[in-house]
Image: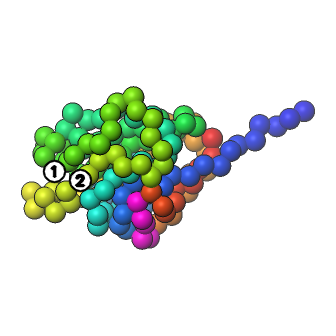
Amino acid sequence: MKLFKHKNFQLLSPVSGNAVSITETPDKVFSDKVLGDGVAVIPDKNEVVSPVDGTVVQIARTLHAICIEADNHAEILLHLGIDTVELNGEGFTCCVKKGEHVAAGQKLMDMDINFIKNKGYSTVSPCIITNMDYVKDLNVITGHAEAGKTVVITYQV
């Protein structure tokens, strides 16, 4: 009799900067893990990349958020800044389209972190897995992270 064996997966940092616990996000929806669990990154560069191989399933009209279904079916939400929906797309330049398959580390977007800060918004960017019922043993790695290179989350499915 074979027992089901979980497979190990990882998410790369979507932006370069300082990765912190999701509980440190200055928005209770994220810090209380209402939408899922993950990590928050305080970016120090403008480039946003895919944390996984997967398909872009949604891009917010205001470009402040992007959803990716990983090839392993984990559902990933990248939320770029806090309350940045109010910028109506200003400060963001999207480089992909809905339905496009992306590779881990592939550029998705640019976010102008200086513009966002100057408008009075936080640039803290949560990266969460929203279908947590599908995921086992999620672990977050904090500290300095390089976009598309540093593992910030490990998990099993």
Span colored in magenta: 143-147
The mark found on residue 91 in the picture is 1
Look at the numbered discs 1 and 2 and tell me whether their residues touch, using CB distance below 8 Å: yes
Q: Amino acid at mark 1?
A: Gly
Give how far across and how far down residue 157 sits, in percent. 63, 41
Between residue 70 and residue 153, name the one nearer to us: 70
- Residue at the (58%, 37%) spot, across then down: 72
Question: Could you tell me which quadrant the N terminus lies in?
Answer: top right
Within-10-Å neighbours for mark 2: few <14, some 14–19, many 20+: many
Whether residue 136 can be seen here:
yes
Between residue 152 and residue 105, name the one nearer to us: 105
- Residue at the (16%, 50%) spot, across then down: 91
The mark found on residue 111 in the picture is 2
Q: Is residue 69 left or right of residue 3?
A: left
Give how far across and how far down residue 71 sits, in percent. 55, 36
- Residue at the (43%, 66%) spot, across then down: 145
- Residue at the (37%, 68%) spot, across then down: 18
